[in-house]
Amino acid sequence: MSRAHSLRIRLLGAMFAVFALGLGASLASYRWSVDNVIEGLHEHTLENQAHELLEALQERPDGSIEVILQSNWSQVYSDPSREFTFTVFDRERHPIAWSANLSAPLQFVPVKGDRQLGPVEFTGIGRTQQAVVTARGPGKTTVQVARQHVDRDVLVDSLFEEESEHALILIPFALLGLGLIWMISGWSLRPIARASREAAQVGPRLPDLRISPTGLATEIRPLVEAVNGALDRLSRAYSAERRLTADAAHELRTPLAVLNLRLQRARLTGTIDWPSVERELNQMGRLVNQLIDLARKEALSSERRAEELPVVNLSRLVREAAALVLPLIEAQGRRLEVDVPDSVPMRGHADDLGDMVRNLLDNALIHGRGTVTARIEAANDDPAFIVIEVRDEGTGVPLGQEESVFQRFYKLHAETPGSGLGLAIVRHVARSHGGDAHFLPGLGCIVVHLPALICAPSAVPAPA
């Protein structure tokens, strides 16, 4: 079982981790920069001093060398607290001048290589260790500058610690930033809390209530739309179930009452009208079966989209339905004609489409008269649709009631057999497949439009 967590705490922890990572990266970068600066500090400083001393050397008329320093350098080389020193050697490597802060001249270090300035070298051990740069001067003189050597790692640590103290000023701003993150995250999550309260109110009392996307982040709106879509589907299913339950209770009340009266009469008289009882039971059985069939069709239509359905041959389904009702039509002395192409492919539920055609034929058999004709042809107004037409020679539905007959349990004449669900099943199957069904006014003809898989084929008559 997964533990619950706070999105607000996660956001705060993530921002703090990012801040800590950035601060650590900044300190590491600064440490690396200080290390690089210290790496060349001795060399650059001593080389600059060597150049200054070379410019300060002037040759007298007698060939001797005189050191004329600028005032600022004179102060540097005369201050005992300063670590900079120099010594000038003649061609014989004898010291001829040295800085005032030296009690004795430096030890001679020859210039290595062909350059005017030699590399930085270290002389002495421990506290007496010095960094020395030697340069070739005029008249084969040698200039040597030195500085007391400070361990590089110690110097880097010292500078890093001193400069890192400035980073402490970031701590108040970091705390302020975390406080702002806490406030902003609470403000940002407020619409989610409001959406949660709205979702908690959805129920049987308020089935049409939905979560408002107002104020929600763009990333959360798809989730809210998906939840609202699921609630819409559940609401439709709940409404259909309530309507089906109410209709079933209403329609079953009358045959149950009639059957109860017949049983009471049989108890009083000692005789029972079995044909009437069987007729009532058959009517209730047919009604229950049609209700179950309608509920199943509504459930299937909500589970799969039209483009996901398998391909079926509509012509074959019409022929099979015609074969089932043909004995009943012949028993009434009537005719059935089937005019369909060899193959009409479309996507759909074969069982549902077969039930739809059987209900169409049953309706023509029960409420119509004369010859019944079943036909499949291309729709005149839209070639992307095909048409199933079931026609008889009766007068059809009275004007103004073409839509009413498709309602559940609606019957034009109460004494006619049937439960009033056949045409409701026909329209539901047609609409669940992307089509529709309607009566032609003034004619005993029902037309069902269904989407074709490809362009509708031309009609090729088939034997009845």
Image (cartoon, helix red, strand yellow):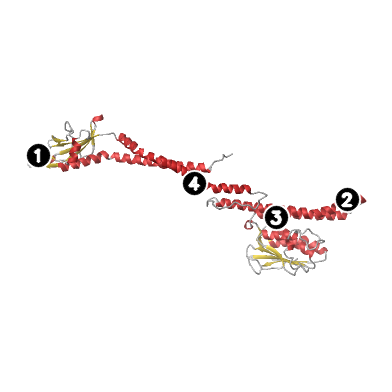
Mark 1 surroundings: few (<14), some (14-19) or many (≥20) residues within 10 A: few
At x 67% / y 50%, what residue is drawn? 205
Q: Position of residue 338 (x, y in %)?
A: 74, 66
Q: What residue type is labelled 3?
A: Lys
Dot 2 lies on which element? helix
* Residue farthest left in this picture: 62
Can you tell which quarter of the image residue 35 is in? top left
- Indicate left or right for 224 with 241 as reference: left
Image depth: mark 1 or mark 2 in front: 2
Marks 4 and 2: which is nearer the front? 4
Question: Which residue in the protein does label 2 denote?
Answer: 264
Secondary structure type for disc 3:
helix
**For marks 4 and 2 on the same chain, the one whose residue lies earlier in the sequence:** 4
Measured in 3D between alpha carbons, the distance from the residue under mark 1 to the one under mark 2, in whole angstroms, is: 152 Å
Distance from disc 4 to disc 2, alpha carbons, whole Å, reads: 76 Å
User: Would residue 119 appear left or right of 253 to someone viewing this image?
Assistant: left
Point out which mark residue 184 bears: 4
